[in-house]
Amino acid sequence: MEYQSTRNDNIVVNSLEAVLMGLSPDGGLFLPKDFDKIKFDWQEVMGLPTVEMAAKIMGALLPEFEDMPGLCQKAYKGKFETEDLTPVVKAGKNRVAELFRGPTSAFKDVALSMLPQLICAAKKQLGKDEKTLILTATSGDTGKAALEGFHDIPGIGIIVFYPDGGVSQVQRLQMVTQEGANVKVCAIRGNFDDAQTGVKNVFAKAEAEKVFEGTGIALSSANSINIGRLAPQLTYYFKAYSDLLARGEIKAGEKLDFAVPTGNFGDILAGYFAKTLGLPVGKLICASNANNVLFDFLTTGHYDRKRPFIKTTSPSMDILVSSNLERMLYLACGDAARVAGWMKDLSEKGCYDVDEDTLSKLKETFFAAYASDETAAETIKKVFEKEGYLMDTHTAVAWNATEQYRTATGSDAPIAVLSTASPYKFPQAVLSAIAEKGEALPQDEFEMMERLSEKTGVAIPKNLAGLKSRKVLHTDCIEPGEIFNYVMQKSREI
Ligand SMILES: *Cc1c(COP(=O)(O)O)cnc(C)c1O
């Protein structure tokens, strides 16, 4: 199947090449060329075991891969807490799709367990024997999930950059204790956008100056700009729908709304992809924290990154440039030249305006809302007390968005809330939210986990409980401007 750049209809590759390249050479992102012509019968995957469902969906999106069922088995079998990967539980009016039951307790495991399989298979089928160097900027969760997926995979090296002081103690420890001969983890003195921009610049410079030519190294990305990251994420939309159908909570064909805690716009875009493949998706509720650039954009059509970057209790959504929105813009307007223009404005002026038609197309599918840290904390407390359900800060932002949506529309139908992290990944914020007034809280995140578990009876995931005793292996910390040289140096070592 043909994939094209969002900025140029004439840059065309197949799905194997798209996965290996990550980013298109012109800086655009890859999308299926005739997306709405892909033939897919959503009803056929209802009721299938999740891993089989994943293979069918990814097989439709990435048809050049020869053994998708085998790749899915390797990626998922025995790696998640539950065999169905992403269980759906009832909590009040909402249904929570728990996407965090993987090896690092964040939803990114769903995609990053799969991506290494896709990259290795693509190299094999294309007869490439170069070393793939994965570069990743992380706001916290991608980093560990990528390290977990890629460590000690032959023919692959991985470097992860995270914002110094911009991730939780647990998130940092998850990364800096990572073992494996092919991994490097480095802090950046800056925020997530600085790290992401630095990594994008390495790709641009490597392409423009052909710096890796003849070295046997090819760059790739584990960020959600890679189509191989996005494709595995469609599965849990189908799986959530399938579960509600099986329980008789919706009827076949009835539209189901999803609330999605959004940062880089990858998770929610997968919902739009699922809808394009025919799944009866209703509204996609785009939930942001105080960094509400997407809320402003989806309500006014004006995207403006020139605003203070706010550190919140949902750090994986602290993002001002949502890279995957570019794909949605192309899907909404179908005009690569216009998308290229907006992206040029974004990089040169820090903002852009879309036309009325594009905005109204977006509004057909997306409802936008945002919540402050305070509101998220109140939501955690309220939902725990009323429904007995404990959720993390990111999920709480999405839960609050469902309340805003219900108020705005009067809808009473079940909404699937995508739960993107275990509450134990953010013990400080979650514990303070449910603590009694005046209760003295421990300082250390591991003691907080214990306290949280005592109070709620919810078990601490094993991978997090064991972190404390692991050895710190990575201590590098650099300026954003040093990222390129760092990559050049480390690329020879791993
Ligand atoms: C990455 C992440 C998000 C945001 O997902 P995007 O695909 O970047 O929109 C939300 N919550 C958690 C816990 C995450 O790790």
Image (spheres, rainbow, N blue to C red):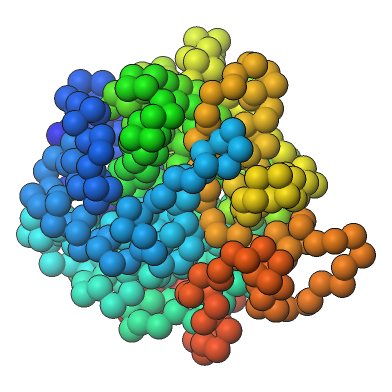
Can you give x and y, in whole percent of width and height, for residue 222 in the image? 37, 57
Q: Nearer the viewer, residue 84 or 466?
A: 84
Q: Is 65 on the left or on the right of 347, as rendered?
A: left
Q: Is 10 on the left or on the right of 106, as rendered?
A: left
Quadrant placement of the C terminus: bottom left
Q: How many marks?
A: 0
Can you give x and y, in whole percent of width and height, for residue 158 in the image? 36, 70
**Residue pushed farthest right?**
438
Residue 167 makes an appearance in the image: no
Quarter assignment of residue 46: top left
Quadrant placement of the N terminus: top left
Decide: is 110 above or below 296.
Answer: below
Q: Is 420 on the left or on the right of 80, as rendered?
A: right
Q: Which of 229 and 325 is in front in this view?
A: 229
**Residue pushed farthest top?**
357
Can you give x and y, in whole percent of width and height, for residue 344 in the image? 50, 32
Name the residue: 29% across, 23% down: 278
Can you give x and y, in whole percent of width and height, for residue 149 in the image? 34, 66
Name the residue: 60% across, 72% down: 170
